[in-house]
Image (tube, helix red, strand yellow):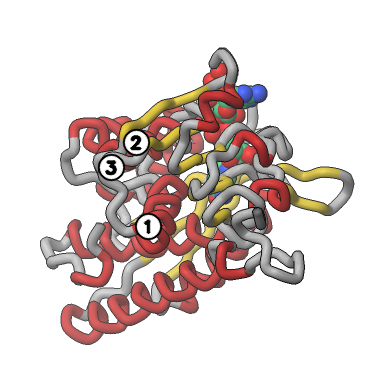
Amino acid sequence: MRAHNITANGAIDMSSIIDGKAHAARLRERVGEAAAALAEKHGVTPGLTAVLVGDDPASEVYVRSKGKQTRAAGMASFERRLPAQTGEEDLLKLVGELNNDDAVDGILVQLPLPKQIRAERVINAINPQKDVDGFHIENAGALAVGADALLPCTPFGCILLLKEKIGDMSGMHAVVVGRSNIVGKPVAMLLLREHCTVTIAHSRTRDLPEVCRRADILIAAAGRAEMIKGDWIKPGAVVIDVGINRVGDKKLVGDVEFDAAMKNAAAVTPVPGGVGPMTIACLLRNTLVAACRRRGISVPESLRE
Ligand code: NDP
C-alpha cells in the first residue's frame, strides 16, 4: 500500500504541507484592513514598541522583521534599544514609561534577556492590556480560566493553523511535547478550549514514542532537532512543528523529522515557513486587538478568536 502522503510517482504530496507563510500573509492582510478602518473611523493608529537589550544577532533579525511587518500593516513601529549591561531597574523604568505612553498599544520585550535581568519580573511589569506577547501572569491566568486574554502568539498561531486544516477539533487526542510557559502550557490550554483531549509530554515522560503514536494532533515544542521520528506519528495525524533548531552554520530544522513524518501524517508544518510566520502575524493581530480594547472599541469580526 502507498504511504499516506506519497504520490503515485513517489514524490511528496505538497497539499499536505501546511503553508504557514500563506496563512500568515492572509492574517496580516486582515490586520491591515482592520488598521485602515480604525484610522478612518476613530483616528487611531495602533503602535507596537519592541524593546531590545543587548545585541543578540537572532533577536536583531526578529525585531527588524517585526518592525517591517508592523509598518506594512499600517501600524506604528517603535524600537527602544538598551546596552547589554543594562540593569533590571533601568529596564523596569523603561517599561513603566511605555505603560504610560498613549501612542504605545503593544510592548514586546525581546527574549532572551541578559543574565542580570529577571525576565519574569520585567514581563509582569508590563501593563497586561499592552502585553501583546501574552506572557504576563494575568493573561496566562485568564487563559487558564477561560477569561478574555491577550493570547501568546506562537500557541495562538498553532491553533489558527489547526483550525484551518481540521476545523472542529472536538474530541481529538492532542499531544503536546514541551511544557514551557511560552509554548507548551498555553498551547495545551488552547487545545483544551477547542475540546481536545490533551496530553502534555516533557523530558521525564516515559515512552515518548508510544505517547506520540496516540496523537491525532501532535505539537512538537521541545527544541530538539528532529527528535520526533516518522514512525512516532499516527497515520493521518496533523503535526505542528514549533521547534526552531540551527544545525551546522545556516540550516534550520524543526523538532520533527519532516520527510519521514510526511509519510504518515495527513499534514505537517515545515520549518522554516510553518509556525514562525504565524507568530509574527499573531503579534500584529494582538497589537490591533489591544488598541481596540484599550479604547473600548469593538474588535473587528475578522480578528476575533
Ligand atoms: P524550552 O526549552 O523552554 O522548553 C522545552 C520543553 O521541551 C521543556 O518542557 C522540556 O521538558 C521539553 N523537552 C526537552 N527535551 C525533551 C525530550 N528529549 N523529550 C521530551 N520533552 C523534552 O523551549 P520553548 O518552549 O521556549 O521552545 C521550544 C521550541 O520552540 C524551541 O526550538 C524554540 O526555538 C521554538 N520556538 C519557536 C517559536 C516560533 O515562533 N516558531 C517561538 C517560540 C519558541 P522539561 O520541562 O522536562 O525540561
* Contact check, label 2 and label 3, Cβ < 8 Å: yes
Which dot marks residue 166? 1
| Label 2 residue SS | loop
| Pointers 2 and 1 in contact (C-beta within 8 Å) | no
Q: Nearer the viewer, residue 47 or 134?
A: 134
At label 1, the amino acid type is: Ile
- Residue at 47% x, 69% y: name it: 23
Q: Name the outermost residue toward the bottom.
A: 40
Which residue type carries mark 3?
Answer: Pro
Label 2, label 1: how far apart the Cα atoms are: 30 Å
Q: Quadrant of residue 54?
A: top right
Mark 1 residue element: helix
Neighbor class of circle 1 (other Cα within 10 Å; few <14, some 14-19, many 20+) is few
Is residue 52 visible in the rendered image? The answer is yes
Q: Position of residue 22 (x, y in %)?
A: 52, 72
Residue displayed at 63% across by 69% down: 14
Q: Is residue 258 above or below residue 25?
A: above
Q: Which residue is mark 2?
A: 136
Instruction: Give me the residue at 40% from left, 78% from top.
Output: 29
Q: Report the front residue among 43 and 180.
A: 180
Rendered residue at 17%/83% (across/down): 41
- Mark seen at residue 128: 3
3D distance between C-alphas at marks 3 and 1: 32 Å
Give the mark toward the camera: 3 or 1: 1
Marker count (numbered): 3
